[in-house]
Every structure is written in C-alpha cells, then in structure tokens.
Amino acid sequence: MTGRERFLIGGFGGLAPVLILFATGDFQRLSFHALLGTALGYGIRVIALFLIGGGVVSLYRDEEVRIKLFQLGLGAPAMIAGILASSTNTMTVPGDPAATGARACSPWYTHRPPPRTA
C-alpha cells in the first residue's frame, strides 16, 4: 500500500466526526442559510481534520490493515471535534448553584432576606 493511499484512508477517518453530524440529522447547528463565515469555518474544519487524520496515520508506517488505518485517523480528530463541540462561551462562577444544576429553591426566594420573627 502506498503512502498516499494510507494518508487518504486516515484522512477519511479524520472526517468521520463531521460525517456523523450529517448522519444524525443535526442540521440545526449547520444551517443552510449560513453566512460565508460559517461555511468558510466548516471548510477549514474539514481540511484540518483530514490533514490531522492523514498525519496521524503517516506516523504508523508499519500498519497495513485498512480498518486500523481508518481508526488511527479517527483518533485525534475525534477528540478535537468532541472538545470543540462541548465547549461553551458562557462563564460560570465557582460555587454558583445555577452552574451545578442545583435548583432546590426558586431564585426569587434565595435572594430574599429571611422573615423576621418577633
């Protein structure tokens, strides 16, 4: 198997996380009314994941089994895509009950001073 074939197999393995987006039908995140910047961003992501997958496979020169090459190409880009998908732009304050999901009391009640007893 030539180095080019190995690189292509690894590159397609690197594209697998992006292809899963289409397979799951999550088109809300990928709108067809996307602006040029969004389309350019997805294009750069596809190229980068393909190159990373192919690059990882090129490190393993002894491997000849195609499915293993695909899996090697899938490894690093899948982790990177998972990190990018799970990142949020919201800041949370440590110890904030809203950040941990603790909603024992309504927010109105928690900010009200306790009632005075006579």
Image (tube, rainbow, N blue to C red):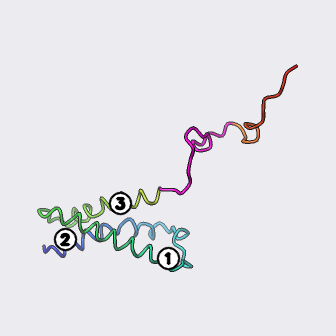
Q: Earlier in the sequence, mark 1 or mark 3?
A: 1
Q: Which mark is residue 37?
A: 1
Residue drawn at (30%, 67%), measured in percent from left and top?
13
Residue 12, position in %: x, y? 30, 71
Is residue 93 magenta-colored?
yes
Q: Image quadrant of residue 62?
A: bottom left
Q: Image quadrant of residue 74?
A: bottom left
| Secondary structure that dominates the magenta span | loop
Q: Which residue is mark 2?
A: 6
User: Where does the magenta region start and end?
Assistant: 87-104
User: Local crowd at mark 2 within 10 Å, few (<14), some, or many (≥20)?
Assistant: many
- For the residues bearing labels 2 and 3, Cβ distance under 8 angstroms: no
- Please state, as top left, top right, bottom left or bottom right, where the N terminus lies in the image: bottom left
Disc 3 residue type (three-letter): Ala
Instruction: Report the front residue among 99 and 65.
Output: 99
Question: Exactly how many numbered labels are in the figure?
Answer: 3
Mark pair 1, 2: CA separation = 32 Å
- Please state, as top left, top right, bottom left or bottom right, where the C terminus lies in the image: top right
- Element carrying mark 1: helix
Q: Which residue is mark 3?
A: 78
Residue 78, position in %: x, y? 35, 60
Mark pair 1, 3: CA separation = 23 Å
Residue 28, position in %: x, y? 56, 69
User: Local crowd at mark 1 within 10 Å, few (<14), some, or many (≥20)?
Assistant: few
Disc 2 residue type (three-letter): Arg
Residue 108, position in %: x, y? 76, 41
- Element carrying mark 3: helix
